[in-house]
Image (cartoon, rainbow, N blue to C red):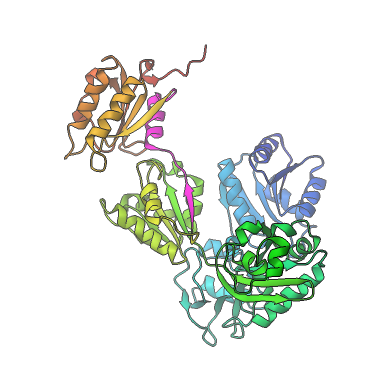
Amino acid sequence: MIGLVAATANGGRNARHLRDSWPDAVLYEGVVRESVARAWRECDGVVIFLATGAALRLVSGLLGDKDEDPGVVTVDDGCRFAVSLCGGHEGGANELARRVAGSLGAEPVITTASEAVETPSLGAFGAELGFTVEDGPDLAAVGRAVVSGDEVLLVSERRWPLGPLPHNVVRAESPRSGTPSVVISDRIEAPGRSSRPSVVYRPSSLVVGVGCSRGAAADEILGLLRSSLREAGLSEKSVARLASVEAKRDEAGPHEAAAILGVGITFYPAEALSTIEAPNPSEAVMRAVGTPSVSEAAALAEGGELVVEKQKSANATVAVVRTPVRGRLYLISLGPGDDGLIPPMAREALWRSALVVGLDQYVDRVRHVLRPGTRVEMPPLGSEVERAETAILEARAGGSAALVSSGDIGVYAMGSPALEALGDADGEVEVISVPGITAANAAASLLGSPLGHDHCSISLSDLLTPWEAIERRIRAAGAGDFVVSFYNPRSRGRDWQLGKARDILLEHRSRETPIGLVTDAYRPTQTVKVTDLGSLRVEDVDMLTVVIVGGSQTRVMDGRMVTPRGYTL
């Protein structure tokens, strides 16, 4: 939960905006000092709309252990800056500052050492993947080595979508004596754990299936779970969740065990579990709950490797599965040319991507956003399949890759070929799409409001779509009186299609129908022209132009195209 505290009228307006926008935000009203103290006790993060000096005096008496204190962000009264005041890493204030800035249009101010040199914070390393750091004395020493540029080894049995790593962090199969190490493992005796200095991270990689008799106590379930993990050499900190059969949903024992572990629990229908092949089925279990296996089948329900077969106590059974690593594929929309129109979500996704793939002009637009260590691939125009496959290969290997396009990546761009190439990935790749401002939207905003009523978009490129199909769609749009946005209207090798489209539309609407031509929207070379359908000069258009043809109700008012919505004014 995020607590919001404001001391001024303007701060209150911004705080209420966040409260109304964020489902996890609560506004504390009343005496400011008392509100801050309440938010401090009750929330994971606190946003104070107040000058940093005043906010610092309010929280100074509340500061305790940095591992337990909430992160604090301050926002000035002009809403220009969101300052990560304290708890930057452990309290999540750095991420909270970026979140506040994205919602309010402010600039995040983050001064922790790792962010200053754009290296990952070891305190928050892998947090979005569910990693927890093993208690130990070497965190600061390894962190200093990362920031200082000294060689640091990354030792992991599996690859994870960690995002870009600094050049001095080198992947290795095993640690070296005296070389700082970052180790990721769910094994109690993780490789390199005894090598100093080292930091061990526990990934959320284990699912524990649980079966139990009616009334089985949480203590018995936990005792069996912990002994089974210990015998297998697996860390309890890597347990991501428990799983069982739907028939056990009303049993208190599994719920209490999950609560003590601090994890969730999932219940599956017996019919679903009965289709999963498990090595130790039981006829008695089948008669009791409708599936021959509970603990093994529930643990295996979402795939993975069974690393601990069914273990029994008097009233409980457990089994453990190591889940597969899911790589990440970000499909990122960059919007039109201006940097201010790049979505905040796109910046965050680029920050988390170890590999960025796209046309050179798109990648060049975001180079300043990329973290050090980010790899870049730029297959040329015409290599769309290669671009998609390059990003997918990285994600399938357990890494994190971004595929970037201008406009919206799902509109005449790389979104559909990427998803087609990915196919049925069986859950091995997590796909995260970032929407953007389309070329038609950008052109329309510069022309006025031509898309104020029903409209459609049609690409005039017949490289992938037969002209006969394109022509049918133009005729249908004309007959339906749709405002039409034409993409890919003309190139050196395709110089007749726009003229033909104009002639088709003239069969359905007058020569005076307004038409807008926008080239290089929101770029320094931008041009905007409003004319009419009968006067359209095809030679004024190229591949970087969006052509918007109005409908029968579209008018030109003070030089702007307007398609009325139909309200009575």
Q: Is residue 310 or residue 147 the one in the foreground?
A: 310
In the displayed structure, 343 sits above or below 192; it is above
Give coordinates of residue 498: x percent, y percent: 22, 29
Q: Residue at x 40, y 34 (%)?
A: 442
In the displayed structure, 391 sits above or below 27; it is below
Residue 401 located left or right of residue 535: right
Q: Is residue 410 magenta?
A: no
Q: Is residue 472 or residue 72 the one in the foreground?
A: 472
Q: Which residue is drawn at 79% across and 60% down?
A: 251
Give coordinates of residue 274: x percent, y percent: 61, 62
Extent of the magenta region: 430-453
In the displayed orientation, state which residue is furthest to the top: 569
Q: Is residue 312 or residue 96 the one in the foreground?
A: 312
Give coordinates of residue 449: x percent, y percent: 42, 24
Residue 186 visible in this rendered orientation of the protein: no
Residue 67 located left or right of residue 503: right
Q: Residue at x 62, y 52 (%)?
A: 96
Residue 107 located left or right of residue 289: left
Name the image quarter holding residue 71. Answer: bottom right
Name the image quarter holding residue 470. Answer: top left
Q: Is residue 437 magenta?
A: yes
